[in-house]
């Protein structure tokens, strides 16, 4: 007797999508089923090497594909770990991860693009319903006696006891049409997506037999043939691998249907022996900015798959990298602790990071256009590596690009340095979240006047990491919103003293009036048109940084007071000096205007409105 089950609601939604919306790239269902079979073989393989109960097991790890043209069925069988009844229910009736929700959210309506997302979201099995109206899964878990048959028409499913001689899983698809019972077509799909899975895939193939001398007609015979290479691509010699093969392997491990931008293949044979094959994708993975992102790097030890869930294999700022690390001298039962503390692993990680960063530097040098494409997608992530005190900061800085106050497009720090004025002491930047506002900030007036380039940093991550980057290639990097650059861009000291004396009384009054809101009111040397500007003390976080810290949950920040710098040459101060009656209102208005100009909210909008109205009436 079969037990009947309903799918989890999420699975129902997903199946509806599979059947009704995603139909342009149906062939990937085979990649997904083969990938699951390969995973199941990985799991069993690993147990055989590490678990006493499995050590005596003898079996041939392989995948078999067969089809029946008349019945329109296609069967994919593996000799892997298999599934118990409970596992059939959880694995093929529910979605454990937050997979579907994110998947459904990511959908763009472009069926081709959408179907390429399937594998990335851990919903691969269900893609078989794109081509089949009914699916049977017969499975026997290794080292158990019972076998079960899971059967579904995509509305609900049934499970019943059945007979199966060997452990593993056999999946039969009842196809909607006969496209996928064509021998040649299946062979091609396997070669395209699954050529380098580590296990052989067998299929009956019709082979042409040349006519013998006394026969006129050629004949054909059917032979069970291995279709894929089943070689660990990363172990092969670089020279023997074509770009196409590298790209195909990428698609297989990443479930991404777009060619990667770059591959980096290393075989180290020094003190520590290991191989790595890394890829830089050309598209952004959906979970790039999620805390629970999936690691894209698989760890092998002596060709045995260990884990694809070890985020510590590469630093988080390289989480966009996909690929394989295969280490020779590690025990197979490496635990998470070992991964973190093992000296060999640490060294492999260090070398890998160096390699990736240097390959990216070459990439930037050799193909700027393509590099820009890379940077647009992954630049933000890469810049996370500038946080803290890592050894790789210099190498990462070489890879960064920024907008500029003087040039279009993105420039590197090297390009900035090359264009520096002779007497220019530092690299200057302004940060915040609105490019237009930054470019027009009063803080840039003196730089514009002196024709000094300023880097425009309008990404959130800039605000966080740039204060931690003190220099590039021995040149200090400084924010224009900090007080300590005044000396570097001072115009004329004598003149400043003269200006100061002209507004002395006003300055004293303004300090008194604004003392609760600003640390100080000072004469500025960085303004030419604006009347006033807000800056921050060298060791105080500027406004963008304060916002950032708040967003990151630091709500107990002490109140940081800015410094109001005033432009002593501006006629408003000369007039106030003559006629100080309205100094209080005007000081407050000047402070609020300076706030607005630097993107800060004004503290008391209704008071600001009142003052402004009063001043307007006066003006009329
Ligand atoms: P994912 O492979 O990303 O986990 P899938 O939808 O492709 O997502 O598969 C769901 C789960 O079903 C797998 O994680 C696995 O536990 C189980 N499964 C699928 N196919 C097999 C198989 N051939 N042998 C053993 N388990 C399988
Ligand atoms: Mg899968």
Image (cartoon, rainbow, N blue to C red):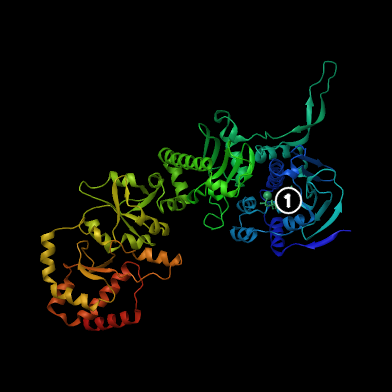
Crowding near pointer 1: few (<14 within 10 Å), some, many (20+)?
many
Of the pair 468 and 508, the residue shown nearer to us: 468
Q: Is residue 36 above or below residue 603?
A: above
Of the pair 567 and 542, the residue shown nearer to us: 542
The answer to whether residue 310 is left or right of residue 364 is: right
Residue displayed at 84% across by 60% down: 3
Q: Is residue 432 above or below residue 148?
A: below
Q: Position of residue 408 (x, y in %)?
A: 35, 51
Residue displayed at 62% across by 51% down: 120
- The quarter of the picture where the N terminus appears is bottom right
Q: Position of residue 231 (x, y in %)?
A: 65, 34
Asked whether residue 304 appears in the rendered view, the answer is yes
Q: Residue furthest top?
A: 213
Residue that mark 1 sits on: 128
Q: Position of residue 15 (x, y in %)?
A: 71, 58
- The quarter of the picture where the C terminus appears is bottom left
Asked whether residue 282 appears in the rendered view, the answer is no
Q: Quadrant of residue 278?
A: top right
Q: Quadrant of residue 549?
A: bottom left
The answer to whether residue 93 is left or right of residue 453 is: right
The answer to whether residue 105 is left or right of residue 227 is: left
């Amino acid at each position: 007797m079969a037990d009947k089950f309903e799918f989890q609601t999420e699975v129902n939604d997903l199946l509806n999508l599979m059947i009704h919306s995603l139909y342009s790239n149906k062939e990937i269902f085979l990649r997904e089923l083969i990938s699951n079979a390969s995973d199941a073989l990985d799991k069993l393989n690993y147990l055989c090497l590490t678990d006493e109960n499995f050590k005596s097991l003898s079996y041939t790890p392989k995948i078999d594909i067969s089809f029946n043209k008349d019945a329109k069925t296609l069967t994919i069988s593996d000799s892997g770990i298999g599934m118990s009844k409970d596992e059939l229910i959880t694995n093929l009736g529910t979605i454990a991860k937050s997979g579907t929700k994110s998947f459904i959210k990511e959908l763009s309506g472009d069926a081709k693009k959408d179907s390429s997302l399937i594998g990335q979201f851990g919903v691969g099995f269900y893609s078989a319903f794109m081509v089949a109206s009914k699916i049977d899964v017969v499975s026997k878990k290794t080292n158990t006696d019972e076998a079960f048959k899971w059967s579904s028409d995509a509305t609900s499913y049934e499970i019943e006891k059945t007979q199966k001689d060997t452990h593993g899983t056999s999946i039969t698809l009842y196809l909607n049409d006969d496209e996928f019972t064509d021998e040649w077509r299946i062979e091609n799909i396997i070669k395209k997506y699954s050529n380098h899975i580590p296990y052989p895939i067998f299929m009956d193939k019709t082979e042409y037999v040349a006519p013998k001398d006394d026969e006129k007609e050629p004949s054909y015979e059917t032979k069970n043939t291995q279709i894929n290479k089943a070689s660990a691509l990363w172990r092969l010699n670089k020279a023997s691998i074509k770009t196409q093969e590298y790209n195909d392997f990428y698609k297989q491990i990443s479930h991404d249907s777009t060619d990667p931008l770059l591959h980096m293949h290393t075989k180290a044979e020094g003190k520590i022996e290991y191989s790595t094959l890394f890829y830089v994708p050309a598209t952004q993975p959906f979970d790039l900015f999620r805390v629970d992102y999936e690691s894209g790097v698989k760890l092998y030890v002596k060709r045995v798959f260990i884990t694809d869930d070890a985020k510590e294999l590469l630093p988080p700022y390289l989480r966009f990298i996909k690929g394989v690390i295969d280490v020779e001298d590690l025990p197979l039962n490496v635990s998470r602790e070992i991964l973190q503390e093992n000296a060999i692993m640490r060294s492999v990680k260090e070398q890998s990071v160096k390699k990736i960063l240097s390959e990216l530097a070459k990439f930037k040098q050799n193909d700027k256009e393509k590099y820009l494409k890379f940077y647009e997608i992954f630049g933000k992530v890469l810049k996370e590596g500038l946080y803290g005190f890592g050894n790789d900061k210099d190498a990462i800085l070489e890879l960064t690009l920024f907008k500029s106050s003087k040039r279009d497009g993105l420039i590197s720090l090297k390009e900035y340095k090359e264009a520096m004025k002779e007497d220019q002491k530092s690299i200057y930047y302004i940060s915040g979240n609105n490019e237009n506002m930054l470019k027009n900030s009063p803080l840039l007036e003196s730089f514009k006047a002196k024709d000094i380039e300023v880097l425009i940093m309008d990404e959130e991550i800039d605000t966080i990491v740039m204060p931690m980057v003190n220099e590039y290639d021995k040149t200090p990097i400084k924010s224009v919103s900090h007080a300590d650059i005044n000396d570097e861009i001072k115009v004329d000291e004598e003149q400043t003293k003269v200006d100061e004396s002209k507004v002395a009384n006003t300055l004293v009054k303004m300090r008194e009036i604004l003392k609760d809101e600003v640390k100080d009111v000072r004469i500025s040397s960085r303004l030419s048109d604006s009347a006033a500007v807000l800056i921050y003390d060298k060791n105080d976080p500027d406004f963008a940084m304060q916002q950032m810290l708040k967003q990151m949950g630091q709500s107990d920040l002490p109140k940081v007071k800015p410094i109001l710098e005033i432009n002593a040459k501006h006629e408003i101060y000369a007039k106030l000096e003559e006629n100080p009656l309205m100094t209080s209102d005007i000081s407050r208005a000047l402070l609020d205007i300076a706030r607005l100009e630097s993107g800060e909210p004004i503290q008391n909008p209704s008071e600001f409105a009142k003052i402004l109205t009063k001043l307007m009436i006066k003006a009329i």
